[in-house]
Image: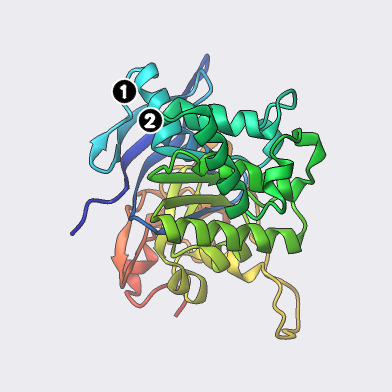
Amino acid sequence: MSVPVLSVCGLSVVFPTRRGTLIAVDDVTFDIAAGEVLGVVGESGAGKSLTGAAVIGLLEPPGRAAGGEVRLKGERIDNLPPEAMRRVRGRRIGMVFQDPLTSLNPLYRIGDQLVETIRTHIAISEGKARERAIELLNEAGIQGARARIDSYPHEFSGGMRQRVVLALALCAEPDLLIADEPTTALDVSIQAQIIALLKRLCRERGTAVMLVTHDMGVIAETADRVAVMYSGRIAEIGPVRDVLQRPRHPYTKGLMGAIPSIAGRAGRLVQIPGSMPRLAAVPKGCAFHPRCSRALDRCRIERPEPMPVGQSEVACWLVTENPAGVSA
């Protein structure tokens, strides 16, 4: 088998405080292959964005990676010095944030920012870098790219700015792209365009994608596999069709039950009772058991590790009671 583009093994992120150390990401493991989109989904506070930030070495102090390994094409990168990691971050890993204005300097023209990024990571002349920037803007769907390359960020709409940020993230032809809620601030029609663009560009380039979102619709449309996170851990991971159509973890089933159906389904949507536990008050055993209507006595004492079920892995003791899955 080929080496995954991204391999995360046993990753943990902690925040030291005066009252003790809080574990925000706890023993997370997953791989992403070339050309594959892994969706990472869950409620706010589940640890999705922190996992992405840990992968690229952008954790805000006092947060720090406290365990595990991150490998890019087999090479360990989580222990690199800051300067070496900075080179990896722009050249081999691209990043798309939720708000494009956080990635674009409002004082500089779009073209200047693209050219600077290209020349930082690729040894080419300024003229060739400018032509490359125009090609990238065209690929990203910016109409009249040659005329608009000298525009400022405020002269673009939100959707156009997100296209520019996508071009910026891909300009060094990275092996991995991490997209953190890239469509949240956009209306539905623009969301669909950005999703289609993301899929096309990454398929054509063979780029691996880690797509962080809370939107199951975006996951269904974009991802090949999906990892459902809860309280800093992966509750369920597997092929997107299997996880969305036949969820096996009670939390995943609750997320799917909360999505409105266009098939005219009658009745109220399913609501998961309670809320995500605070980092200082994560319960013993399975973190989801206080909100789970099917919790066993074992769930309150022992923390389940991911267990294989078909092509998926599920961290739930109910799987041992019913190997066919909890949704059966």
Q: Position of residue 109 (x, y in %)?
A: 71, 30
| Mark 1 nearby-residue class (10 Å; few <14, some 14–19, many ≥20) | few
| Mark closest to the chain's N terminus, 2 or 1 | 1
Write the residue at 75% across / 74% down. Answer: 268
Instruction: Determine the CA span between mark 2 and mark 1.
Output: 9 Å
| Mark 2 nearby-residue class (10 Å; few <14, some 14–19, many ≥20) | some
Q: Residue furthest front?
A: 127
Q: As drawn, is 221 to the left or to the right of 16? A: right
**Would you name the residue on which mark 1 appears?**
80
Above or below residue 47? Residue 2 is: below
Q: Residue furthest left?
A: 1
Asked whether the residues under the numbered discs 2 and 1 touch, taking CB atoms below 8 Å apart as contact, a structural biologist would say yes
Q: As drawn, is 159 to the left or to the right of 96? A: right
Q: As drawn, is 304 to the left or to the right of 179? A: left
Q: How many marks?
A: 2
Element under label 2?
Answer: helix
Question: Can residue 205 be spotted in the picture?
Answer: yes
Write the residue at 58% across / 34% down. Answer: 114
Identify the disc placed on residue 219: none
Above or below residue 283? Residue 253 is: below
Identify the disc placed on residue 88: 2
Question: Can residue 13 be spotted in the picture?
Answer: no
The residue closer to the viewer here, 150 or 86, is 150
> Could you say which quadrant of the image residue 242 lies in?
bottom left
Quadrant of the drawing holding the N terminus: bottom left
Check disc 1 and give the amino acid type: Leu
The residue closer to the viewer here, 217 or 141, is 141
The residue closer to the viewer here, 294 or 159, is 159
Q: Position of residue 217 (x, y in %)?
A: 62, 65
